[in-house]
Amino acid sequence: MNVRQAPEFPQWPQYDENEREGLIRALEQGQWWRMGGNEVDSFEREFAEFHGAAHALAVTNGTHALELALQCMGVGPGTEVVVPAFTFISSSQAAQRLGAVAVPVDVDPHTYNIDVAAAAAAVTPRTRAIMPVHMAGFLADMDALSKLSADTGVPLLQDAAHAHGARWQGKRVGELGTVAAFSFQNGKLMTAGEGGAVLFPDTEMYETAFLRHSCGRPRTDRRYLHQIAGSNLRLNEFSAAVLRAQLGRVEEQITTRQQRWAVLSPLLDAIDGVVPQRADERTDFPSHYMAMFRVPGIGEEDRNALVDRLVAAGVPAFAAFRAIYRTDAFWEVGAPDETPDQIAERCPHTEAISKDCVWLHHRVLLAGEQDMHRTAEIIADVVAAV
Ligand SMILES: *Cc1c(COP(=O)(O)O)cnc(C)c1O
């Protein structure tokens, strides 16, 4: 491989005076939980407004956001949730943790988003939710999914852990009429290290979710009235103060990532054997969590070696998600009555993508335009070498 100047990528997470001031503000409030302070309440209002949603509820993390949303949608023992087979494991674990069965279905080979026909085929009388995951901030086909939801009566839960600020045909995630769950884990597009939120279009469900996320207890309760089953999923004031500052930076950073992806993606496309992730063009404002590409047919071992070489060359690269049905965790509780090979047979694209796909950290897309050229050159060299 040629030795050339390594590209330079910004650090992640990022912060400035706004995070610093927020933390001090929360500290000096004297009350550090949401029931005593203003930061979580304010963040929820701002986050809901940013996404065009009626209500937002902040929670401890994105996995809990999915769990809470599913619980509010009636998911529990004896029910099923349809999830994409190619996703981060929380999508299925949230359903399984509630005692439900997670039913994995295949994804599209270009967008890596849930295959709507496969989702339709997986719906049974026990299905309580269909969970599209907006992979890397490219939205799943929300038109077809909305139609499927209307036809079957099964509601959608958007796993929007990659989709802060993304838009589908001009509509923000909160304007698509469904519940949506977000993560603020360290790598996500806005972060407080950990954290999560759920958007609700519906006031009644939001009120129930509020109770459930606070041990079933009404906001002003002083008599230990626990009205409904729940847990403690409350976000703390420090995290919310940081997230308020992060929210102020999201849109500008997304715009930069869009500009860089417009440069990097055709460069990747021009490399022999490399196929970048493609957006459904109705995703007119993708948020670009991760820059993903496939090297079709490379095989899992060589893909992993490719990732190692990219990392050695200074590019923050990662192997894409393992198919959820290829993990031990998936089979412990709440798996369908099938074998891994049976699921693999009806998920051929997931099977392939999970072995030939590489993702780059989104901080790559925050670097300069020249760095996109250098990154593509490194990828071309490494792909040619494995
Ligand atoms: C990050 C992530 C989650 C879980 O979020 P945490 O805050 O880490 O619990 C859920 N779904 C997807 C697709 C994710 O990438």
Image (spheres, grey):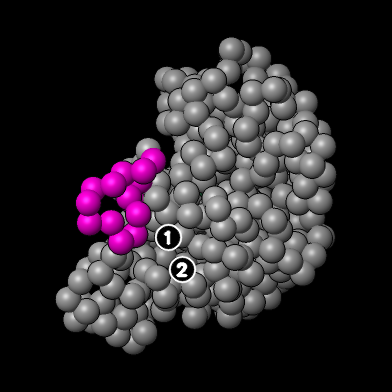
**Where does residue 159 sit, x and y in percent of width and height?**
58, 49
Direction from residue 287 to residue 307 in the image, left or right: left
- Along the line of sight, the residue nearer the viewer: 33 or 294: 33
Q: Which mark is residue 191?
A: none
Label 2 sits on a secondary structure element that is helix
Quarter of the rendering containing residue 200: bottom right
Q: Residues within 10 Å of mark 1 (few under 14, many from 20)?
A: many
Which three-letter amino acid code belongs to the residue tagged 1? Ala
Residue at 66% from the left image edge and 44% from the top image edge: 156
Seen at 82% across and 44% down, the residue is: 147
For the residues labelled 1 and 2, say whether their Cβ atoms are less than 8 Å apart: yes
Residue assigned mark 1: 58
According to the picture, the residue beneath numbered tag 2 turns out to be: 44
* Figure check: 52 above or below 383: below
Magenta-highlighted residues: 214-228
Q: Residue 77's spot in the image, x, y percent?
A: 49, 23
Magenta stretch contains residue 223: yes
Disc 2 packing (10 Å; few <14; some 14–19; many ≥20): many
Q: Is residue 259 visible?
A: yes
- Is 299 placed above or below 206 here? above
Mark 2: C-beta under 8 Å from nearest atom of ligand 1: no
With 309 as the anchor, is 374 left or right in this view? right
Identified by mark 2, the residue type is Glu
Q: Is residue 376 above or below residue 160?
A: below
Q: Position of residue 310 (x, y in %)?
A: 51, 54
Cα separation between marks 1 and 2: 6 Å
Q: Is residue 385 visible?
A: no
- List the single residue furthest toward the front: 223
Q: Residue at x 55, y 35 (%)?
A: 74
Q: Position of residue 205 (x, y in %)?
A: 54, 50
Picture residue at 50% right of the left edge, 28% below the top: 76
